[in-house]
Image: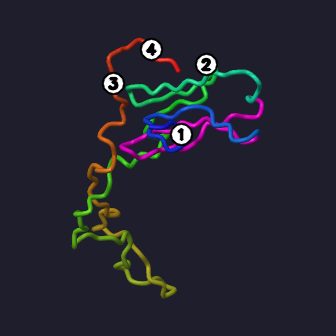
């Protein structure tokens, strides 16, 4: 395939120098054919732009973490599942229904009746079990693993 903006990729990382005042370091991942851009892009300040060549490094580790460097200076690090908008690990079970006897109201009219001013008083509902939430099930749209593929140690790869 041709190399360009529409080309397939697994990891796309490097500086994207749009203009003199807006620059960032792209860190995009492919998740089952869906292109995901990093939630908080890595920016390059005007003082970082100069006539020199810089080395950008992206480490995607097997424990689900990443690190990004510019000239061996750390730009960003963290967990892959927190930094990219992957689908949630669990979603509400669409087949789960709220029980008919579920009590939604935390407060009920007081058994003592209204106050002296005629305003109804409220008391805590002893049958209240909290806000109902449906059961959580694994999200079928989330990749089975966010760990990068593991390969036999080939030494190193340089670009």
Q: Which residue is mark 2?
A: 72
Of 49 and 116, the residue lying toward us: 49
Label 2: state its secondary structure. loop
Q: Could you tell me if the residues under marks 2 and 4 are in contact, i.e. CB atoms within 8 Å?
A: no
Among the two numbered marks 3 and 1 on one chain, the one whose residue lies closer to the N terminus: 1
Q: Which residue is mark 3?
A: 150
Query: In this picture, is 102 found above or below 146?
Result: below
Q: Is residue 40 magenta?
A: yes
Query: In this picture, is 94 found above or below 60?
Result: below
Quarter of image, res 40: top right
Quarter of image, res 134: bottom left
Q: Residues within 10 Å of mark 3 (few under 14, many from 20)?
A: few
Q: Nearer the viewer, mark 3 or mark 4?
A: 4
Q: Residues within 10 Å of mark 1 (few under 14, many from 20)?
A: few
Q: Which residue is mark 4?
A: 156
Q: Measure the alpha-carbon separation of dots 2 and 4.
A: 17 Å
Residue bounds of the magenta highlight: 21-47
Among the two numbered marks 2 and 3 on one chain, the one whose residue lies closer to the N terminus: 2
Among the two numbered marks 1 and 4 on one chain, the one whose residue lies closer to the N terminus: 1
Query: In this picture, is 11 found above or below 121?
Result: above
């Amino acid at each position: 395939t041709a190399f360009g903006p529409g080309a397939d990729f697994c990891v796309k990382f490097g500086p994207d120098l749009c203009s003199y005042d807006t620059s960032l370091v792209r860190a995009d991942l492919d998740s089952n054919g869906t292109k995901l851009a990093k939630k908080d892009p890595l920016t390059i300040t005007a003082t970082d732009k100069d006539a020199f060549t810089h080395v950008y490094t992206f480490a995607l580790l097997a424990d689900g973490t990443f690190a990004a460097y510019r000239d061996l200076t750390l730009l960003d690090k963290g967990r892959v599942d927190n930094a990219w908008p992957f689908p949630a690990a669990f979603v509400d079970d669409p087949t789960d229904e709220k029980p008919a006897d579920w009590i939604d109201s935390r407060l009920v009219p007081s058994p003592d009746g209204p106050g002296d001013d005629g305003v109804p008083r409220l008391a805590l509902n002893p049958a209240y079990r909290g806000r109902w939430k449906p059961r959580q099930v694994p999200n079928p749209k989330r990749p089975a693993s966010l760990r990068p593929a593991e390969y036999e140690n080939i030494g190193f790869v340089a670009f």
